[in-house]
Image (tube, grey):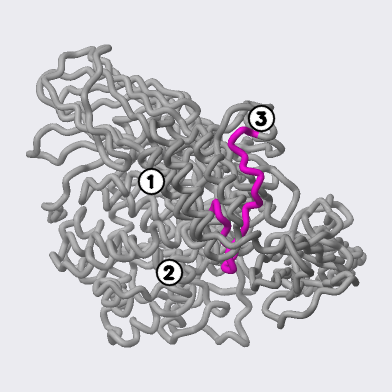
């Protein structure tokens, strides 16, 4: 049986065909290869061997979610689970991490250029596969399970309870774990040639078919709709892959048993039902739906996936390529509105990258490659800590985007710890793509990465020399004979993309976000040089133009700061005609840059510093790019006034990002000025100052006739404007703490003045009614408050200012619970609450440990005498809880 990909236009190269050379990606790759070589296979197999009653050879499991489970837990079969009240269980996702590790070993083996390393990794793959084979055979020989193909690190009872619609908490996504094991086995077959791995996976597939094929469609629908408990990973994908590799069409039907028709039907019809859905639970199924579309010919699968992609990118996608808050997708088009404290689960980016790759194969559409570059460069590479480890993947679970965020690495045994194992050993998999067999020879260059490609079937070799994204150039040597269509991706952010071949300019129609085609009869040794000057850009969130990211070429820049409230950036006087910034960005220590008072680092740095991905625009005056520094010649001196919806003059002017011509820019300034004059926010004199500054500016190249434009425009505005302008109003408060929060009630005073008479001044907090602003300060207690002050003059002209004030005067409170694990162990769970700024961390220490940051429940061995555990929480405002204690009893 072959995969029906008649509509595919491109296919990836095998990992062995592409060799990465030194660059930003090799740092994380080499750190993960160190873990792949050092980590003992016996530790990964320990949970499987324990479940099967085999000798664990003294190995301890990885830990975290990947632990032995409860000491009294049994490997119950499908029908002998004693019930939740009587069953002591723990670590019910165990086995998934080993599946990811097997995938990592196989991928790393396939991509390794060094023969010794390849052999070492192949030996570990074979050792792990043999260990899983022994476990599967031992489980089958026990006669306790429904089919001899069953393979897991716990009993079959979780699958039975899922069929009984048990919730998350009683069970934990059993098919998710099944998928990771099967995916690891299939990677061992594909990338390391293990026929045994394919046989194990096929037996597992037959077991899955036996369980699910007898269930009514309504029952399966309810199962896959369950939050997390029904999370099945990419089971449909691996079953389609089994069908292709074994030729057994039954596996296609098995894959269809995982269909969630309510999602498929809605998405195929273009209806967006994603709000509130668990992101990774459903993102992982999309690749399998594409495969089912290929194998069945049913258009609804592909239609649904393409439509879901369009619902996610860009409308639900953060600047670094991630999505989701607290593991859930938010409302359509919500980026700024979806920023919380737990954004962008790394597993979701892992699955979205796989999906982008698959959609590119089927369409050749550059938008999928555009997303791939954004997410792999920023979120995925940035998810790997810049540190070596022999026992931890050192990757993130979340890569959050809120103010003052912190990447929390390690994640041994978690879902993102598992996908993180794979992410960093396959960076070469989407640098180049080739045309499908039978088509004209076409080579796509999707990523500008220092690398070498060997397209052996067509005797084509390519070497790419570049330091991108640190510089915007790439030198590509092409060793080929005859006709080849070389397609170079033009990044969506680029201006001025140029190409030379053997030193001669090549005339190309370089459209950002598309490809340029260099098709010719090649001779070996030809050199293609690509220039794409890096530009600094201020990129607004789609649903809030006042919230922006700073991006340098493909790199999202993070501003280092301990503050946990919004940092501000004023960039109007740096903005060029096309919207990019001509800013004084200077290199600094540790791979950072300085921009005024900001210290910026690339999102891919892997650092431990607190950061701000999004910044708040805060241009105090209306100004434009001009000569000099300080009081620039193109600074109008006019306040950057805001409309009642909070958007400012400059927000409105630059809302589309940039202008095609200087004339278009000046007309937009006139149009915006006329609007703000009409609102009473600008006087005739202020309007004239704004227009004069625009004409003096260096935004675009000055043209003839601008003096006439200025004269005519200001004359028209004088006729439209009333005398004077709306009154000035200010909110004044003392500076907050270094975190941006006030630790005591905040006091604000309101001042206002009008051109004539005394204005009426009012203030309101959040959505409360307007109240007169008196001489006494406005006092604000705990909460994040939006304070608006407005002043209205005798002619009814109104101006207002808005200020966000964050107050948290009390520390969080932690509750500790302890659960006995047999005679000599206890599981401790620390839960902290803070209803204002939110909990930043919980730390604890025992008699023999240092202060550690809490992530998950942890276990302690009981001693012969009582032990005291100390713990305390800190909130995001910087309030620290007094140290509390928990006394553990002595062992029985």
Q: Residues within 10 Å of mark 2 (few under 14, many from 20)?
A: some
- Residue 709 is situated, as x and y percent measured from the top left of the image, at 43, 42
N-terminal of the pair, mark 1 or mark 2, is 2
Instruction: Report the residue at 11% width, 39% height from top.
Output: 437
Q: Nearer the viewer, mark 3 or mark 1?
A: 3
Q: Nearer the viewer, mark 3 or mark 2?
A: 3
Please name whichever residue, 719 or 443, is drawn nearer the observer in this view of the structure.
719
Residue 332 — which label? 2
Q: Which residue is mark 1?
A: 372
Instruction: Report the residue at 47% width, 53% height from top.
Output: 716
Kindly tell me whether residue 668 is visible in this rendering. Answer: yes
Q: Are marks 3 and 2 in contact (CB under 8 Å)?
A: no
Q: CA distance from mark 3 to mark 2?
A: 42 Å
- Residue 63 is situated, as x and y percent measured from the top left of the image, at 63, 56
Would you say residue 637 sits in the magenta stretch? yes
Q: CA distance from mark 3 to mark 1?
A: 38 Å
Q: Which residue is the extreme one toward the left? A: 438
**Above or below for 125 versus 645:** above
Q: Which residue is mark 3?
A: 629
> For residue 428, what is the image quadrant?
top left
């Amino acid at each position: 049986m072959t995969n029906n990909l008649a509509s595919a236009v491109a296919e990836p190269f095998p990992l062995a065909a592409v060799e990465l050379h030194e660059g930003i990606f090799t740092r994380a790759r080499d750190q993960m290869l160190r873990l792949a070589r050092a980590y003992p296979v016996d530790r990964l197999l320990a949970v499987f061997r324990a479940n099967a009653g085999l000798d664990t050879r003294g190995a301890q499991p990885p830990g975290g979610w990947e632990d032995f489970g409860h000491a009294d837990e049994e490997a119950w079969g499908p029908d002998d689970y004693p019930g939740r009240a009587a069953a002591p269980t723990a670590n019910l996702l165990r086995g998934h991490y080993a599946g990811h590790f097997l995938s990592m070993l196989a991928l790393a083996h396939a991509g390794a250029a060094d023969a010794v390393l390849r052999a070492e990794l192949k030996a570990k793959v074979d050792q792990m596969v043999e260990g899983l084979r022994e476990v599967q055979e031992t489980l089958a020989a026990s006669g306790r399970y429904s089919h001899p193909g069953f393979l897991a690190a716990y009993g079959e009872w979780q699958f039975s309870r899922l069929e009984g619609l048990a919730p998350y908490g009683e069970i934990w996504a059993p098919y998710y774990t099944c998928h990771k094991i099967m995916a690891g086995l299939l990677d061992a077959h594909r990338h390391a040639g293990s026929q045994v791995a394919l046989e194990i996976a096929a037996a597992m597939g037959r077991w899955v078919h036996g369980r699910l094929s007898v269930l009514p469609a309504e029952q399966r629908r309810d199962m896959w709709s369950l939050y997390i408990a029904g999370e099945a990973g990419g089971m449909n994908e691996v079953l389609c892959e089994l069908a292709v590799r074994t030729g057994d069409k039954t596996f296609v039907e098995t894959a269809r048993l995982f269909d969630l028709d309510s999602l498929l039907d809605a998405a195929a019809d273009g209806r967006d039902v994603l709000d509130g859905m668990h992101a990774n639970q459903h993102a992982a199924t999309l690749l399998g739906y594409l495969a089912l579309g290929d194998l069945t010919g049913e258009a609804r699968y592909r239609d649904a996936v393409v439509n879901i992609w369009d619902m996610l990118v860009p409308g639900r996608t953060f600047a670094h390529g991630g999505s989701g808050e607290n593991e859930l997708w938010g409302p359509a088009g919500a980026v700024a509105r979806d920023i919380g404290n737990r954004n962008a689960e790394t597993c979701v980016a892992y699955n979205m990258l796989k999906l982008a790759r698959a959609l590119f194969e089927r369409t050749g559409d550059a938008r999928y490659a555009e997303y791939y570059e954004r997410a792999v460069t920023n979120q995925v590479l940035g998810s790997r800590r810049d540190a070596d480890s022999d026992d931890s993947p050192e990757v993130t679970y979340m890569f959050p985007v809120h103010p003052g965020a912190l990447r929390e690495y390690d994640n041994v045994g978690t879902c993102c710890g598992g996908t993180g194992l794979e992410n960093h050993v396959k960076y070469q998999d989407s640098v180049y793509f080739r045309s499908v067999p039978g088509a004209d020879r076409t080579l796509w260059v999707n990523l500008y990465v220092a690398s070498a490609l060997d397209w052996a079937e067509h005797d084509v070799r390519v070497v790419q020399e570049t330091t991108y994204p640190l510089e915007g150039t790439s030198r590509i040597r092409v060793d080929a004979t005859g006709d080849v269509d070389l397609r170079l991706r033009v990044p969506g952010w680029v201006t001025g993309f140029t190409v030379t071949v053997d030193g001669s300019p090549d005339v190309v129609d370089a459209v950002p976000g598309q490809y340029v085609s260099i098709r010719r009869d090649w001779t070996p040794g030809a050199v293609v040089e690509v220039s794409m000057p890096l530009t600094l850009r201020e990129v607004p969130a789609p649903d809030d133009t006042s919230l922006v990211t700073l991006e340098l070429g493909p790199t999202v820049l993070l501003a280092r700061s301990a503050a946990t409230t919004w940092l501000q950036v004023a960039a109007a006087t740096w903005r060029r005609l096309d919207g990019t910034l001509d800013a004084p960005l200077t290199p600094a220590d540790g791979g950072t840059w300085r921009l005024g008072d900001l210290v910026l680092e690339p999102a891919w740095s892997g650092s431990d510093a607190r950061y701000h991905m999004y910044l708040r625009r805060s241009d105090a005056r209306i100004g434009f790019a001009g000569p000099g520094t300080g009081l620039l010649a193109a600074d109008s001196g006019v306040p950057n006034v805001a409309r009642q919806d909070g958007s400012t003059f400059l927000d409105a002017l630059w809302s589309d990002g940039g202008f095609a011509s200087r004339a278009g820019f000046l007309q937009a300034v006139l149009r915006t000025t006329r609007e703000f004059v009409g609102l009473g926010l600008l006087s005739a004199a202020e309007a004239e100052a704004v227009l004069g500054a625009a004409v003096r500016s260096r935004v675009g190249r000055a043209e003839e006739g601008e003096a006439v434009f200025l004269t005519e425009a200001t004359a028209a505005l004088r006729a439209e404007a009333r005398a004077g302008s709306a009154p000035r109003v200010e909110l004044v408060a003392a500076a907050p703490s270094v975190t941006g929060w006030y630790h005591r009630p905040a006091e604000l005073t309101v001042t206002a003045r009008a051109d004539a008479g005394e204005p009426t001044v009012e203030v309101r907090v959040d959505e409360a009614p307007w109240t007169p602003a008196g001489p006494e300060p406005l006092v604000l207690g705990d909460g994040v408050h939006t304070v608006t002050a407005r002043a209205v003059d005798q002619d009814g002209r109104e101006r207002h200012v808005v200020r966000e004030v964050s107050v948290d005067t009390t520390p969080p409170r932690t509750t500790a619970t302890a659960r006995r694990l047999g005679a000599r162990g206890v599981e401790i769970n620390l839960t902290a609450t803070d209803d204002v700024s939110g909990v930043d961390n919980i730390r604890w220490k025992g008699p023999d440990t240092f202060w550690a940051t809490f992530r998950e429940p942890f276990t302690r061995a009981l001693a012969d005498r009582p032990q005291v555990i100390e713990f305390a929480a800190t909130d995001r405002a910087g309030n620290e809880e007094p140290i509390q204690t928990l006394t553990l009893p002595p062992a029985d």
